[in-house]
Image (cartoon, rainbow, N blue to C red):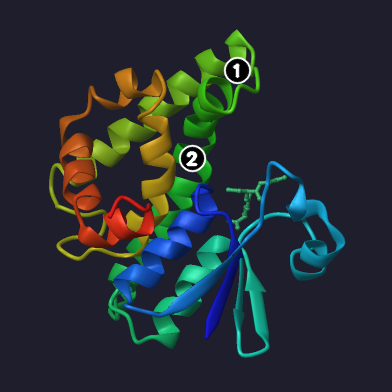
Amino acid sequence: MLKIYGNPGSTCTRKVLMTLAETNTPSEMTVIDLAKGEHKGEAHMARQPFGRVPVLEDDGFQVFESRAICRYLNERNDGKLVPSDAKARAKMEQWISIETSEFSPPAMKFVYEYLLKRPQGQDALDAAGKALTAACAIMDAQLAKTPYFVGDEFTLADICFMPYFEYGMMTPAKDIIEKFPHVMAWWKRVSERPTWQKATGKN
Ligand SMILES: N[C@@H](CCC(=O)N[C@@H](CS)C(=O)NCC(=O)O)C(=O)O
């Protein structure tokens, strides 16, 4: 049985859980309690030398880094989350990079400040607000044309945005994001998927 060492509330673990749900892959989770510092304990550091979650274990094979795990799971399970066409695949990678570099870092500033109560400072929050506005404008322009980041197909690009997006919406970043109607329509579309409900423990 495939094993995930992760935490169901963590953004990075949620990407993996969503990919498991979308590819209908059975798995079991060993919960790593971040509040207790289990991720920095000897046993977990041996699996993930940066002391972070998640880690995937598949019959003796181990891999960490959530986006790498998602790509592996899709390929292992013959999933449909990565386009077979090279150009569409390049676009998927483009959007995953945008998520990693442009969207998630500013969104997480708000999450650290307002949900995790780790003060970021007003200057950092102002800068994050500007960066988030810029990212959302670019996302909105794409999502005005297509229902998902890569055309008509739900891909790993959509999955990678989802956990950060959900938590960002629980903070004042919501006021920024809500100004972008196509981004909001995308969020409604993807967050209503039964797989997301399952991945985030809502059903
Ligand atoms: N790039 C890594 C980041 C992993 C990461 O930062 N995980 C967070 C939870 S979402 C974590 O373990 N945080 C605890 C820490 O960094 O001490 C990935 O995508 O897997």
Q: Is residue 102 above or below residue 18?
A: above
- Judged from the image, the secondary structure of the residue bearing numbered disc 1 is helix
Relative to 92, is 53 on the left or the right?
Answer: right
In the displayed structure, does residue 190 sit left or right of residue 64? left
Above-or-below relation of 136 to 70: above
Residue type highlighted by circle 2: Ser
Q: Identify the residue at horizontal 59%, vertical 60% (top origin).
A: 6
Up the image or down, 75 lies above or below 122; here it is below
Disc with the residue nearer the chain's start (1 vs 2): 2
Residue 95 located left or right of residue 102: left
Q: Position of residue 78 (x, y in %)?
A: 34, 87
- Residue 104's label in the rendered image is 2
Q: Quadrant of the C terminus?
A: bottom left
Q: Residue at x 22, y 59 (%)?
A: 194
Q: On residue 124, which mark appears?
A: 1
Which of the 4 quarters of the picture holds residue 168? top left
Neighbourhood count class around disc 2 (C-alpha, 10 Å): few under 14, some 14–19, many 20 upward: many
User: Image point 30% across, 65% down: which residue?
Assistant: 155
Q: CA distance from mark 1 to mark 2?
A: 14 Å
Q: Most extreme residue toward the bottom, as rendered? A: 59
Question: Which residue sits at x=47%, y=77%?
Answer: 27
